[in-house]
Image: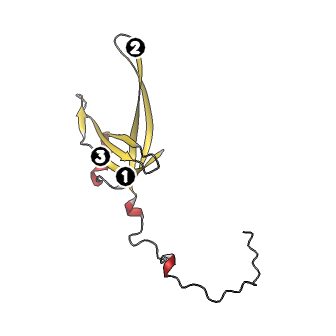
């Protein structure tokens, strides 16, 4: 699965427990009619993937949905979901810097040699 949007927040890498588990969170805001702020966590060696990115950059993030079950000491069962990132791409780098090589439509001269009687076999 993938999420596209602009980076809203990049957190610091945090270490948990005696085994040194690492986690780093980021928030991506989708660009749609109703933007969503999606928190994505990167764990262990994937934390360093965020070092090359900054707030405001348009990105595409490869994600996995993770779910787990937890039973409290009192026997109550709870379920937790997380969105875990495993790849991130800078979308701004994929766009041509000067736009396309085609000038905007208003820079074309209007056609002057139109003949309305020419046969047009296009169906629309």
- Say few, some or many: other residues with alpha carbon within 10 Å of mark 3 (under 14 / 14 to 19 / 20 or more): some
Please tell me which residue is depicted at 41% across the width and 63% down the height of the picture: 94
Mark 3–mark 2 contact, CB under 8 Å?
no
* Rendering coords of residue 54 (x, y %): 28, 53
The residue that label 1 is drawn on is 6
**Element under label 1?**
strand
User: Label 1 to label 2, Cα distance in Å?
Assistant: 38 Å
Q: Is residue 31 above or below residue 21?
A: below
Camera-side residue: 31 or 112? 112
Camera-side residue: 82 or 48? 82
The residue that label 2 is drawn on is 76
Q: Is residue 87 above or below residue 122?
A: above
* Rendering coords of residue 28 (x, y %): 37, 46
- Say few, some or many: other residues with alpha carbon within 10 Å of mark 1 (under 14 / 14 to 19 / 20 or more): many
Camera-side residue: 34 or 90? 34
Camera-side residue: 71 or 33? 33
User: Label 3 to label 1, Cα distance in Å?
Assistant: 9 Å
- Say few, some or many: other residues with alpha carbon within 10 Å of mark 2 (under 14 / 14 to 19 / 20 or more): few
Please tell me which residue is depicted at 47% across the width and 76% down the height of the picture: 101
Q: Is residue 123 visible?
A: yes
The residue that label 3 is drawn on is 9
Give the quarter of the image for residue 113.
bottom right
Please tell me which residue is depicted at 50% across the width and 78% down the height of the picture: 106
């Amino acid at each position: 699965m993938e999420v596209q949007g602009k980076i809203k927040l990049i957190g610091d890498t945090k270490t948990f427990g005696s085994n040194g588990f690492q986690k780093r969170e980021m928030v991506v805001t989708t660009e749609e009619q109703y933007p969503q702020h999606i928190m994505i966590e990167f764990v262990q060696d994937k934390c360093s993937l965020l070092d090359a990115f900054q707030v405001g950059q348009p990105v595409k993030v490869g994600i996995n949905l993770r779910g787990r079950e937890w039973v409290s000491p009192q026997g109550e069962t709870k379920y937790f979901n997380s969105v875990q990132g495993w790849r991130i791409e800078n979308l701004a780098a994929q766009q041509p810097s000067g736009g396309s090589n085609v000038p905007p439509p208003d820079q074309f001269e209007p056609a002057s040699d139109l003949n309305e009687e020419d046969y047009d076999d296009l169906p629309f």
